Image: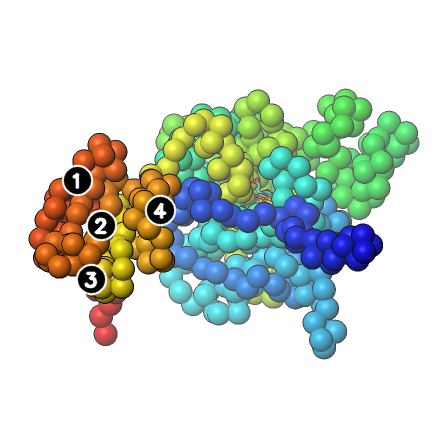
Amino acid sequence: MADEKEEKKERYKPFRAPKGVHDILPSDHEYHTYIKKVVRHRARQAGFRRITTPTFEYTDLFKRSIGDSSDIVSKEMYTFEDKKGRSLTLKPEGTAGVVRSYIQNGMNQLAQPVLLYYFEPHYRYDKPQKGRYRQFFQFGFEIIGESDPALDAQCIQIANKIHDDLGIKELFDLQINTIGTSEARKKYMQVVEDFYVGKERSLCENCKGRLHKNPLRLLDCKEEDCQILAKLAPTMRDYLDKESLEFHEELLEYLNEIGIEYTENEKLVRGLDYYSKTVFEFWDKTEGAQNAIGGGGRYDGLVELLGGQSTPAVGYAAGVERVIANMKKEKIKVPSKDELHVFVAQLGKEAKKKCLPLIEDLREAGIKSMGALGKGSINVQLRLADKFNVPYTVLIGLTEVREGTAIIRDMEKGIQETVNYEDVVDRVAELIGEDALDKYTPGELLYS
Ligand code: HAM
């Protein structure tokens, strides 16, 4: 008997979301909505248009663009086979898909540069911890089709503006570097590899493993011993091409011109292979790189690498969960439009018949209303109204039906008034105030 009970308990154990992923509950959706609006506003102001690429792509797209030896490709991808044995991967980042789409849809025929932005979930098999999830949202910007440091500056400026709008700009420090063209970098990679060969014993396990595959990553390893060695390593600047260095100087001049503060960080390389020249990250002022809010850079070789014509590009992406965590840390509240204005309570079938059209009229007038259409007593319904935290309740009982009236109750003051049934909508609208009404009706804006 007891065994049977246990077995049943086990069989009907409540499910939990898989490790590292979470629901976006209504209270967090208010942040999502707000951030999305800010991103959309700043994007539109600067001529960006929204793009959504598929949640999964062919695995090779990510391998070729992000690089086989990167952490993302070597450890963090959600890869699976479809029924025909094709290898697919949930997108771990947005840039590769956007570039694939740029090529596939012939966007090189449009006026250049093409300005695109996105706000989407991404997937990485990361070790879950604070600010690190297996499904996370990013908003990002890509500027494809033009090579000029002024565009890198513009990309950074938009990121900065959005952080400012969201009230978290002061928490982050812009770290910036140039990693040169891929040819110059190849030369430097060899130099770095040669520097580390023979010093393997002082490296962490992770760095030992990537020394011959991706030596540049050793330079920004967070382990203490690796950091000591990294300080002694030959500096990248000494090996970079003149053009990249000049490009970088020009970018810094533009940033100075538009008043954006930055920290030059010659060790910053970023973890994705597609970058060339500019790389940047917004580091948490107290926690550093660990909880960077976002990062980006120039990727002049990527369009060609993915089969398009040689086309320069630059972009940026930020992590939405980290943005929200920082907004909460700063105690920033976002405007909530979800709160109800009115709870409509009724007693009896006849009253319910009166309530249904009334609820519709209230909603049409922009009054956010919910009806207690179940069978509870008036007291039960009023308690419910309290729980929903509405400022007003409209009550219709048998007397009100007979007399053609309704009661409007101010829930905070605990006072009520009786008005004619026909006047309920106008009176509630008056009480709530014109400004608070929710009259947004996107359907009216349609045209053919
Ligand atoms: P990323 O640095 O890999 O760059 O990611 C950008 C941001 O996404 C990070 O700074 C972080 O805020 C957030 N993020 C990354 N992984 C996680 C995670 N596991 N959990 C929570 N948040 C995370 C890119 O993805 C590039 N595509 C950016 C770019 C756009 N470069 C050019 N254009």
Query: In this rendering, would 266 be left or right of 247?
Result: right
Residue at coordinates 61% horizontally, 57% vertically from top-left?
A: 91
Establish whether ligand 1 lies closer than 8 Å to the Cβ of label 4.
Answer: no
Q: Can residue 284 be seen by looking at this rendering?
A: yes
**Which of disc 1 and disc 2 is earlier in sequence?**
2
The label number, if any, that marks residue 395 in the structure image: 2
| Residue at 38% in and 57% down | 49
Label 4: few (<14), some or many (≥20) within 10 Å? few
Q: Which mark is residue 354?
A: 3
**What percent of the width, then of the height, locates residue 75?**
75, 49
Q: Are marks 4 and 2 in contact (CB under 8 Å)?
A: no
Q: Is residue 3 above or below residue 176?
A: below
Across and down, in percent, residue 235 comes to: 70, 29
Residue 416: assigned label: 1
- Residue 224 lies, in percent from the top left, at 76, 23
Judge whether 447 appears above or below 63 on screen: below
* Numbered circle sitting on residue 380: 4
Q: As shown in the figure, which amino acid type bears the numbered disc 1?
A: Gln
Of the residues shown, which amino acid type is indicated by label 4? Val
Helix, strand or loop at mark 3: helix
